[in-house]
Image (tube, helix red, strand yellow):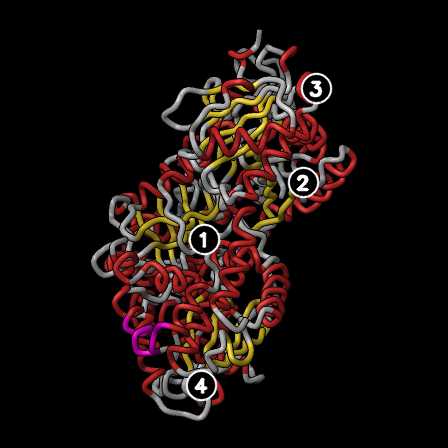
Amino acid sequence: MKSLAELQAIRDRAKAQLDLRKENPNAAKVLVGMATCGIAAGARPVLNAFTEEIAKRGLTDSVTVTQTGCIGICQYEPVVEVEIPGQEKVTYVKVAPEMVARIVNDHIVHHNVVTEYTIGALK
Amino acid sequence: MYRSNVLVCGGTGCTSSHSLLIAEKLKEELRDKGLDKEVNVITTGCFGLCALGPIMVVYPEGSFYSMVKLEDIPEIVEEHLNKGRIVTRLLYQETVEDDTIKSLNKTAFYEKQQRIALRNCGIIDPEKIDDYIANDGYAALGKVLTEMTPEQVIQTMLDSGLRGRGGAGFPTGLKWKFAAGNQADQKYVCCNADEGDPGAFMDRSVLEGDPHVVLEAMAIAGYAIGASKGYIYVRAEYPIAVKRLQIAIDQAHEYGLLGDDIFGTGFNFDIQLRLGAGAFVCGEETALMTSIEGKRGEPRPRPPFPAVKGLYRKPTTLNNVETYANIPQIILKGADWFASMGTEKSKGTKVFALGGKINHTGLVEVPMGTTLRTIIEEIGGGIPNGKKFKAAQTGGPSGGCIPAEHLDVPIDYDNLLAIGSMMGSGGLIVMDEDNCMVDIAKFFLEFTVDESCGKCTPCRIGTKRLLEMLDMITKGKGSLEMLDEMEELCNYIKVNSLCGLGQTAPNPVLSTLRYFKDEYIAHVVDHKCPAGVCKDLLEYSIIKDKCYGCGMCAKKCPVGAISVTGYTAPGKKKPAYEIDPTKCAKCGVCIDTCKFKAIIKG
């Protein structure tokens, strides 16, 4: 270790994993439906895509990604709920891994709900 | 990137209830289900709630599973980790409230705690230096080496008000200042990890759960006093701690955080382990250093103090594990932050090892000035089976017993001394109405008699004579004069012993004499043990009118002391039994066996 910058680099690299082990009541929450219906519809890659995207953007200290059970709209799985403190909960349906980056960028980072992916956009 | 972290406690408590097998099983199940790339299993240090082990916490949900069994693992993996359905049934029930799950930090055990020394225990993987660095590890060493002069470091320690956590409470900054002020070609930094008090295990938890914090703090001390070498004197009876310390030292070397030219500043520091072979006296500073030198661990007179002539007769600073665990945080957050916690003369927090008659056996860290009542009744969850609190023993064999009347005294170094006990390393043993205080004093004296090194006469012979008197009292052979003699001898040993072991050895006797003299009097005058502990003063007997004559007690009695009589109580069909006191071994099996509560002791 020859400089503080080296230490900082290691710290930055390792911090994301550690953030996951702290409870943060003010964090935004991404809840991915992972009941049998969700898993069958492909929720696992969606869940992992969220985890990767959050880590990539260095948001691990302000956003938690968790699983949840079936919320009763199995035909629309994979279902993802996004809760940002102080804002109304938004439910995204039929989420695919390709949609994840946009939800994170537009909704979680810039607070613009991606309306066309939400349950309200379904006909 | 893992989506979920499962922390399994790998402290000694949980390890002994097979937490490492649980971690293995978890990994195996996750592999079978193809989840091993998504879910990370980490073996951590102690969570503190040892009574509920094996402990397992799943993040990001923060679900706290207690007393986990191997056969629960497949269900937790399938339901929780695969499908996201927390297995509420297996959670620590205090975290479950109706339909919602409370955060661990909101439970009675954790809510009143403030974790500084234990901040990484139960969060990081102690065998991964990256985990420590991620939680600001080695940042304090970086700051000290690049931004501060040794004088500034010492001033920060002085301003923080940190006092030695090993028990005596000497100001750490002052210790460093003395060592820094003495010029020599070589100085040393030592760490006292020879935690020997019966019932104390806070240092072990730090070493097992966060070994790097000790290395970092020792390097900071080395910079402050001008030392380039350090020794950690750790008990050989702590195999997990020894193993993790060695891993930590190797990793720190690999990263260049120990060794030569740390952070490119030209500062060199190296640390070696020394294993203690289990002598209590080696926790005394001069004996510890003598032992590191490879000699028989015996204390020597002070002065000269270690800051002048310590290890290999060079200036040395020696601090306790818990003291070191506070230091990096003080450097990073400032002396004012640390001094804002605690009481006027005792700053910061203190870790206590709760044991004895208490529901939540484990480790707690609270701000100085917290009352015993808060620790025992709120955090510790009170005394099991609705029994009444009698006393709390702090400071191990060097400390004393605190009676119920002092439950509301704010705990700090000076208050504990004032009520005849001492902080000690932080063992806190709770006793209820079933404990005999004379017996407790005798227990600790037996310990000090065994552990007295024998170098000085007051301790070697004095403690032996004390124990003999206590033994006579517990056998009903004492007298009131003996109590006075004992007190006189206690004071003599205190004043004349060479080291801390002897100087504090009479404390358990003195404090019980002070607060529980009535129990001593009951032993010497009435020849009774009010708590029913001292066997020689007990007599077991059968109340014949309650005896149904079933004979179960006679069958169970290991010495054949129970036989049938010719008397049949009114309303009973069989003749009653009786105990022959000359044969009775006072084991108590008959009392546990009798369904009719017909047997009493007293």
What whole-number distance in Å separates the C-alpha atoms at marks 3 and 2?
A: 68 Å
Given residues B346 and B266, the one toward you in this image is: B266
Q: Residue at x 61, y 61 (%)?
A: B244
User: Which circle, 1 or 3, is nearer the viewer?
Assistant: 3
Assign a secondary structure to mark 2.
Answer: loop
Amino acid under disc 2: Pro
Q: Give the residue at mark 1.
A: B118
Amino acid under disc 3: Ala
Q: Position of residue B283 (x, y in %)?
A: 47, 71
Assign a secondary structure to mark 1.
Answer: loop
What whole-number distance in Å separates the C-alpha atoms at marks 1 and 3?
A: 44 Å
Q: Give the residue at mark 4.
A: B187
What whole-number distance in Å separates the C-alpha atoms at marks 4 and 1?
A: 29 Å
Q: Give the residue at mark 3.
A: A41
Given residues B251 and B13, the one toward you in this image is: B251
Few, some or many residues within 10 Å of mark 1 (<14, 14–19, 20+)? many
What whole-number distance in Å separates the C-alpha atoms at marks 1 and 2?
A: 48 Å
- The dot on residue B558 is 2
Assign a secondary structure to mark 4.
Answer: loop
Amino acid under disc 1: Leu
